[in-house]
Amino acid sequence: MGADRSGSAGSVPARSARRSAVLASSIGTLLEYYDYYLFGLAAAVVFPAVFFPSEDPLTGQLSSFATFAVGFVLRPVGGIVIGHIADRFGRKKALILTIVAMGIATILIGVLPGYRQIGVAAPILLVILRLLQGFSTGGEMGGAVSLAVEHAPPRSRGLYGTLLLSGAGVALLVSSGLMALFSMLPDRDFLAWGWRIPFLLSFVLLVAGLIIRMRVGETPDFERARKKSAGARIPLVAVLRRPRNVIYGVLFGFANSIGGYVITTYGASYVKKDLGMPASVALTATMVAAGAQIVLAPTWGALSDRIGRKPVFLGGCVGLAVVIFPVFWLFETKNPVLVAVAMVLGFSVFVMAMSALSQTILSELFDTRSRVTGVNLGYQLTAVLGGGFAPYLSALLVGATGAVWGVGIYVIAGCVLSAIAMLLLPERAGRPLPEPAAEPKAATV
C-alpha cells in the first residue's frame, strides 16, 4: 500500500502521526470550546443572577452578555501573539500554551465568589478571567487546524479540518449536558453551587489534553519550511502583505459566527427569559444540537472534499437565511421537542455546514510560515465583529421592538455578506496547500 501524501508536496506523514495530530487537535479543541461554550451557557442562564443582580431582568441579561462579548476583544490579540509563536517556533508549543491558559481561567471562574459575597469585585474579576479565555481561544483554532490539515492528504483536508468541529460538538454536548443536569436542582442550589461543578471539571480535561498535546510532533510542512527559512520573519507582516485574503477571510465567516451565537447563546436566553421556559429545556435542546454536530461536521467536511468547499458553504448560508425565522417560531411553540428541532435545524444543519469548513478554507489561503497567524486573524476578527456581540445585539433588538424580526434580519444580513465573500474566494479543495514565498533577507523578529 502506497504512502499517503499530506497537504503539500513532498511531505509524507505516517498514519500514526496523522492520528496523533488529529487526536491532539480535537482533544485540545474540545477543552477550549467546552470552557468557552460553558461560559456562554452560564451567561444566558446563571450569571445575570449571580454576578449582575438587578431589579430589571433585561439590565442583568445585557450586563451578562456584555461580559460574554468582552471575551472576544482579546481574541485577535491572542490570535496574533500565539500565531506568531506557532508560525515561528512550532504548532505544539502554541497549542500547549492555549490549553493551559484556558484551563486555568475556567477553573478560577468556578471558584469565583458572586456579587452578594464580594460586591463589584465579582463582575470585575469575571471580566478579567473572560479576557484570559478570549486570549487563549484566539490562538487555539489556527494552531489546531494547521496541525490537522498539514498532516492531511489533499483530498481529505475538509474531513480532517472538520474533525475539530466534532471535538467542539462533544464540548457543547458535555457542557450543555452538565449544565442541564445541574439546572434540575432547586434554583437556590443551582445558583449557589450547582453551576460551578461543570467549570471545576475542566481540570480533568486540562490534564488529559496537556498529556496528549505534549506527545504530538510537529508537522512535516512546518519542519520543511523551518529548514528552508533563511532568516527571521514576522508572520503578521506576511499575512498583511495579502490583505485581500484577510478581508475575505473575515467576511465569509459572518453568517456562521452570527448565526451560531444567535441560535445557541441568545436562543437559550430567549427560551428561558422571554418565553418563561425552564433553563433545562434550552440546555437540553443545545445538547441535542451538539450531538447532531458531532455527526454532521465531518459529513459536511467529507462532502466538501468531493464537490468543493463553495457549494457546501453556500448551501449552508442560503439555508440559514431561509430558516432563521422558522427557528424562532419553533421556539415560540414552547414545545420542548420543537425547541430541540429548531436548534438542530438552525445550528447543527445550516450553521455547521459553514462553520465546519471555515477553518479549513482559511488554512488554504495562507502558506506554512504564516498559516496559523492568518487563520487566527481572519477567524477571530470575524468572531469579534460578528459572533461576539450577537447575543447582546439580539437582546437589544428584542428589548426595543418586543419581537424577533430584527434578529432575523440581522442574521440574514450576515448571510448576504458571507455569500458574496465566498463567491469571490478561489476553490482550493483537493489542491496542494500554498508554498511559502521566498523569505525577504531584511526580515527581522
Image (cartoon, rainbow, N blue to C red):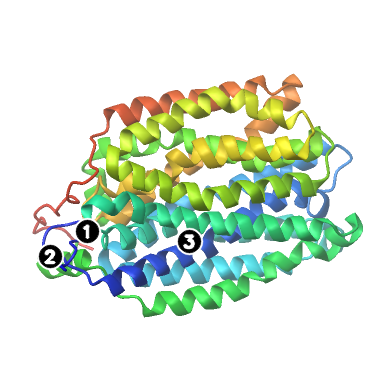
In percent of width and height, residue 140 lies at 43, 59
Which residue is under mark 1?
369
Identity, as a three-letter code, of the amino acid under mark 2? Ser
In percent of width and height, residue 29 lies at 48, 61
Quadrant in the rendering for residue 265: top right
Identity, as a three-letter code, of the amino acid under mark 3? Thr
Number of the label disc, if any, that sits on residue 229: 2
> What crowding class fits label 2: few (fewer than 14 Cα within 10 Å), some (14-19), or many (20 or more)?
some
Which residue appears at 58% of the width and 40% of the height? 261
Vertical arrangement, residue 301 with respect to residue 266, above or below: below
The answer to whether marks 1 and 3 mark residues whose Cβ atoms lie closer than 8 Å is no
Image quarter hosting the N terminus: bottom left
Q: Which of 424 and 6 lies nearest the eye of the viewer?
A: 6
Q: CA distance from mark 1 to mark 3?
A: 22 Å
Looking at the rendered structure, the secondary structure element under dot 1 is loop
In percent of width and height, residue 56 lies at 86, 37
The answer to whether marks 1 and 2 mark residues whose Cβ atoms lie closer than 8 Å is yes
The answer to whether marks 2 and 3 mark residues whose Cβ atoms lie closer than 8 Å is no
Q: Is residue 322 left or right of residue 111?
A: left
